[in-house]
Structure formats: C-alpha cells, structure tokens
Image (spheres, helix red, strand yellow):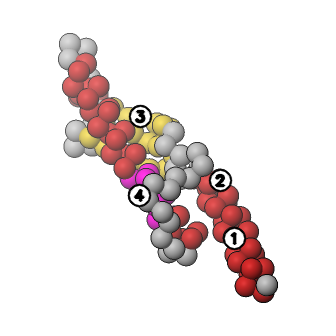
Amino acid sequence: MKNLAGMLKQAQQMQSKMQEMQEGLVELEIEGQSGAGMVKVMLNGKGEMRGLSLDKSIVDPEDTEVLEDLIVAAYNDAKVKVEAAVQDKMKDVTGGMNLPEGFKLPF
C-alpha cells in the first residue's frame, strides 16, 4: 500500500511539473532562419508565431515565390527547434523517463 501511495504522490508531482512547463512554453522564444539569415521567424514554445523579420534586399515584388519559400523554410526551422526544446524540457519533468513513442503534450 505504501508503494501505491508513493506512486500516486510521484504522479501528482509530475503532473504539477508538466503544468508549470506548459505554462512556461508561452514565454520560450525560438528563432528559425532561412536564406542565410535574411528571413527570421520567431515562435514561442507552443509553436505560435510571434515575429517575422525580412531583410529588405530579398523583398522583390516581381518574385514573391522565393520570399514565400524562405518564410516557410524559416518557420519549419523554428518548429524543429521548438520541438527539440520541448523534448528537452519534457526530459527534465519526467526525470529522463522514456515516454511511449508518439506521446504528445496536450496542446
């Protein structure tokens, strides 16, 4: 019975840490880049775009396709970095415990 009570206490502590981590993800800022840094996208830890920066030299009204591709590439770069940062934070919360593949945070 003591083991069960201990396990429940650990689960509650982990749940509390998870909630704190999720709240902190809004504050996390990750930058993705493309075009040698001429396009930059800023995402928070939940993957929400918070900023976009374009070097004026790449803005060509006659060729918007290149700019569109660079924005998508910068966003994807930032998203990969956000996912890696969330994984690292998750390891801190779970104490390095391996969670099942495909486990996603509830957001």
Label for residue 52? Answer: 3
User: Which residue is pictured at 21% across the width and 25% down the height?
Assistant: 66
User: How crowded is the residue under tag 1: few (<14 C-alpha within 10 Å), some, or many (20+)?
Assistant: few
Q: Residue furthest front?
A: 1
Q: Is residue 13 visible?
A: no
User: How crowded is the residue under tag 4: few (<14 C-alpha within 10 Å), some, or many (20+)?
Assistant: few
Range covered by the magenta-colored residues: 81-89
Q: Residue furthest top?
A: 62
Between the C-alphas of marks 2 and 1, the distance is 18 Å
User: Which residue is pictured at 57% across the width and 71% down the height?
Assistant: 94
Image location (x, y in percent) of residue 20: 67, 60
Q: Which residue is mark 4?
A: 84
Image location (x, y in percent) of residue 82: 44, 51
* Image side of residue 87 versus residue 93, left or right: left
Between the C-alphas of marks 3 and 4, the distance is 21 Å
Q: Quick one: label 1 or label 4, which is nearer the N terminus?
A: 1
The kind of residue tagged 4 is Ala
Q: Quick one: label 3 or label 1, which is nearer the N terminus?
A: 1
